[in-house]
Amino acid sequence: MSLLPGAVQRYLDKSAFKGPWTLEGSERSDFAGAVVIPSLAEGDSLFATLQSLADNPPLLTACFLVLIVVNHGEHASAADRLQSSIDLTRLAALAERSELCITWVDAASPGAEVPTKQAGVGFARKLGMDLALPLLSWKEDPLLVCLDADTLVEANYLQSIVSHFRQSALGAATLPFRHQPGNDTAQQAAIDRYELFLRSYVYGLRLAGSPYAFNTVGSAMACRASAYVRCGGMNCRKAGEDFYFLQKLAKTDGVALLSGTTVFPEPRISTRVPFGTGRSMSRLLDGDAQAVLFYPAKAFQVLSDWLRTVEQELSVDAETLLTYAEKISPVLADYLEQANWRTVWPRLQSTHRTGSRRLQAFHVWFDGFKTMRMIHLLCDAGLSRGEPEDVLPDYFFWDGRDCPEVQAEMLEALRSQDGVQQSISVSKI
């Protein structure tokens, strides 16, 4: 194992998990990147994902470590324990014959199970990414790629990622995604609605000029390993880990939209996490019409007015900006007061003397979470959420575009805007 850069070693000493978890499989430490895959009792889905990775060109699969974190909590069900044991056995057999450079973490066998307070997808991602760092070649800036065990990739997946980071100066990227088809009409309708909801939120952010206008899907993100270390690494959240991880990366190294390939998550139904795709799918299929309602464009227009005002008035004092905010929306002004705007803004002005640095610092403070919180408060105060047919035409009108009449066409329009290809070009095994 080669000597690690000082910043990487300091990160591992300070922030990496201490526990019984080690890597099995590949013993190389010269990889140009690592694809990290959390796996909780996945069975065939995991091996379909690995097969789709193996369809990438051999010259690239030889350069990338594929690291699977087989994990479950201390109180996992008997069925999950059994499936994890089967998956570990299958991984060991696959590693001997696969074109992939496979290594795995056993965080599921007795004595290695994840403590209940830590168990979750954030923990599994962080454990895998941290353990990958010493196996990377630091002669150049290696890459860390997040994938899920229910997600298929195209044969140009690795090449698209490598090409992107050769050209981009930013430290992270999100990948175009498109959910796999549902098993039936009801499941298809549910996943289409949920994916449209995700994309419409990002569309609103983009129209408003927010620097956080990118999709936050855990199976569709990648970063330079140096950027991973600089931002403090992955968090351990049981849900929303992707949102907070990309937010940190946006603040330190920037997030770009990668193009040229698409990943295909499964539209699974799950209650493993308190929110997200699986939970929303479950509620929609149970007939809960309130599970996924869309934000009105007016909320993002308030955001747009606020961001533009700050950008144009970087030299005025906090009280003046608060007065401007009151004219834009009393809800916005109240929110800023609660967030200690009168203290925050003078500090940003005194610390950051140039306009560009001051604006950047403002966006670090008024981040993706504060933005989402403000959108929610505006909706709670009277800007009602609604059905896509009622809400989304205002987005398209704002953008100077004609709005498709049906949900399926709206979804394809927003997918196209996000660089998503038209059809799935991979198949399940």
Image (cartoon, grey):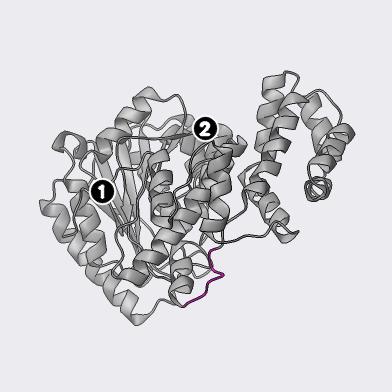
Residue 418 is at least partly visible in this image: no
Quarter of the C terminus within the rendering = bottom left
Identify the residue at the far left of this view.
97
Q: Can you give x and y, in whole percent of width and height, for residue 115 in the image?
A: 48, 68
Residue 157 is at least partly visible in this image: yes
Query: What's under tag 2, amino acid-wise?
Result: Gly
Q: Can you give x and y, in whole percent of width and height, for residue 161 in the image?
A: 32, 35
Query: What's under tag 1, amino acid-wise?
Result: Ser
Q: Residue visible at 29% across and 66% down?
A: 42
Q: Is 291 a magenta residue? A: yes
Badge 1 local density, few (<14 within 10 Å), some, or many (20+)? few
Along the line of sight, the residue nearer the viewer: 118 or 268? 268
Q: Name the quadrant containing residue 19.
A: bottom left
Instruction: From the viewer's perspective, tell me whether residue 201 is left or right of residue 419.
Output: right
Q: Can you give x and y, in whole percent of width and height, for residue 413 in the image?
A: 41, 44
Along the line of sight, the residue nearer the viewer: 188 or 3? 188
Task: For mark 2, give the secondary structure.
Answer: loop
- Mark drawn on residue 44: none
Q: Residue visible at 83% across and 36% down?
A: 324
The part of the chain drawn in magenta is 287-292
Badge 2 local density, few (<14 within 10 Å), some, or many (20+)? some
Q: Residue visible at 19% across and 38% down?
A: 62
Task: For mark 1, give the secondary structure.
Answer: loop
Say whether disc 2 or disc 1 marks the residue closer to the N-terminus.
Answer: 2
Q: Which residue is mark 2?
A: 254
Q: Which residue is mark 1?
A: 423
Q: Name the quadrant containing residue 309.
A: top right
> What secondary structure is the stretch in magenta mostly built from?
loop
Instruction: From the viewer's perspective, tell me whether residue 301 is left or right of residue 157.
Output: right
Q: Is residue 146 above or below residue 265?
A: above
